[in-house]
Image (cartoon, rainbow, N blue to C red):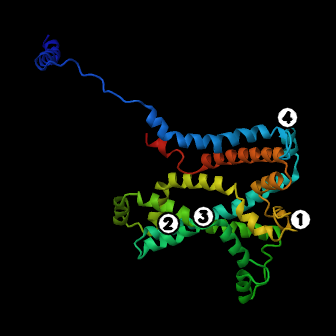
Amino acid sequence: MSLTKASATPTALGARLSRRTGRGAPRSVRRGPAWPMYLAISPFFILFCVFGLYPTVYSLVLSFQKWNGLGTPVWVGFQNFIDLFTDETFYLAIRNTFIIFALSTIPMLILALVLAAMLNSSIRYSTLFRIAYFVPNITSVVAMAVLFGSIFGQNFGIANQLLNAVGLDSVPWLTTPFGIQVTVAVLMTYQWTGYNAIIFLAGMQAIGEDIYEAASLDGAGAFRQFWSITLPLLRPTIMFVVVVSTITGLQSFTEAQVLTSSSSTTNPNSGGAGQGGLTMVLYFYQQAFNYNKFGYGAAIAWGVFLIVVVFTIISWRFSPGRNDGKATR
């Protein structure tokens, strides 16, 4: 009984207050028209539809057609995809891409972790070092490829000069398939190591200092703290970097195209000696824009897309830290 009376008291007070103030129940907030907000965000969606969605849908339609860029496209059904599955050059491009991906991604992630650990320690001029490591990521890839072409040149390259200085023979960096793949991998490692190191550094700085202080009181050294504290707590960041590196590495194009264009004898986009630098995206570019096979090029592009999606899912599935979010719920 007392509870019912108590619960009715605020209502009665509210009714008396409304009668006293002459005001009724709170009215809903008056809202203005919504079209200015939709107008403000419309440029993004218009540009996305014109330059993102429409080309994607059109490339899918084009992959079922035969078209040389002029005239009327001819509908050929799945013939482009049948030709793609039996194209030995496409499988060569897949193999080259994964060799370059393995040669570049694994060393790059290890170097990025080491650099991030060094930058996370108390060193002087740490901001200067962070800028220096990030500069290759904002430098033109074409400019870096031209520079690396000079460094790894056969006769006057600095790389071979250094090898000769220590008594080793010159290496045909840009005239053999494996030499081209190593050179492209070194260039990609140089380009992305600093970027990934900055991401790792951000993850390390999010780890609380009290954890390291407690570990120091327990007698844990620097290596033990890095192995037992930093790496386990950094697993979500490592997963992000692995997934992004997989997507980026499997779409390599400019590095191989610029490095091998001068040494290719048949076509500047053929990948150099033995087609060692012919990546999947470079093969797509060659077929579409050198041989005007736009329908077949679209089929290659969708094949590359499916390969990237599959291996991104595999990288995400086996990356450390995938279940950390579930464990904390």
Tell me if label 1 and label 4 are in contact, CB under 8 Å: no
Q: Position of residue 315 (x, y in %)?
A: 63, 50
The residue singled out by tag 3 in the image is 192
Amino acid marked by disc 4: Gly
Dot 3 or dot 1, earlier in sequence: 3
Q: Secondary structure at mark 1?
A: loop
Query: CA separation, marks 2 and 3?
Result: 13 Å
Depth-wise, is mark 2 or mark 1 nearer the camera? 1
Tell me if label 4 and label 2 are in contact, CB under 8 Å: no
| Res 77 label | 4
Q: Residue at x 65, y 61 (%)?
A: 105
The residue singled out by tag 2 in the image is 116
Query: CA separation, marks 4 and 2?
Result: 51 Å
Tell me if label 2 and label 3 are in contact, CB under 8 Å: no
Amino acid marked by disc 1: Thr
Query: CA separation, marks 3 and 4?
Result: 40 Å
Question: With respect to residue 148, does 203 lie above or below?
Answer: above
Q: Position of residue 133 (x, y in %)?
A: 53, 70
Query: CA separation, marks 1 and 4?
Result: 31 Å
Dot 4 or dot 2, earlier in sequence: 4
In screen coordinates, is 95 left or right of 107? right
The residue singled out by tag 1 in the image is 266
Dot 1 or dot 4, earlier in sequence: 4
Q: Secondary structure at mark 3?
A: helix
In screen coordinates, is 316 left or right of 171? left
In screen coordinates, is 225 left or right of 53? left
Question: With respect to residue 34, does 204 lie above or below?
Answer: below
Where residue 295 sits, quadrant-wise, is top right
Q: Residue at x 50, y 63 (%)?
A: 198
Where residue 34 sits, quadrant-wise, is top left
Q: Position of residue 302 (x, y in %)?
A: 75, 44
Depth-wise, is mark 2 or mark 3 nearer the camera? 3
